[in-house]
Amino acid sequence: MSWSVPLIREHIQRVYNVELTRTGVLRMLWRLSLSYTRPTYVLKKADPKKQKAFRRQLDWIKKTP
């Protein structure tokens, strides 16, 4: 599971009764040599044919004035 900054903030507030800003949480992670990345979605069951058709349609839409 990935922890977002709001989840980390909430956990710190519940466990340690300390309120931090988003920036404060990010700086704390940096000082602890921890990295933060935003979670991304991966669709494992995606149909390659439908993806290709969608890309073609999207390219067509982008070219249309």
Image (spheres, grey):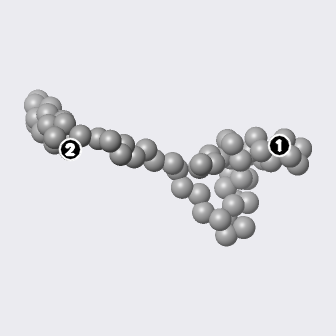
Residue nearer the viewer, 45 or 25: 45
Q: Which residue is depicted at the point 23% across and 40% down?
A: 47
Count of residue discs: 2
Q: Where is residue 65 drawn, in percent x and y? A: 11, 30
Position of 54 with respect to 35 (left or right) is: left
Q: Which residue is depicted at the point 68% across and 51% down?
A: 23
The kind of residue on which mark 1 rests is Gln
Query: Gap between marks 1 and 2, in whole Å?
Result: 44 Å
The kind of residue on which mark 2 rests is Pro
Q: What secondary structure is marked by label 1?
A: helix
For label 2, count other residues whose C-alpha is less than 10 Å away and answer few (under 14), some (14-19) or many (20+).
Answer: few
Dot 1 or dot 2, earlier in sequence: 1
Q: Which residue is depicted at the point 84% across and 41% down?
A: 14
Q: Quadrant of residue 37?
A: bottom right
Q: Which residue, given by chain and number where applicable, does mark 1 sit on? A: 13
Q: Which residue, given by chain and number where applicable, does mark 2 sit on? A: 48
Q: Where is residue 26 drawn, in percent x and y? A: 67, 55
Q: Which residue is depicted at the point 65% across and 65% down?
A: 34
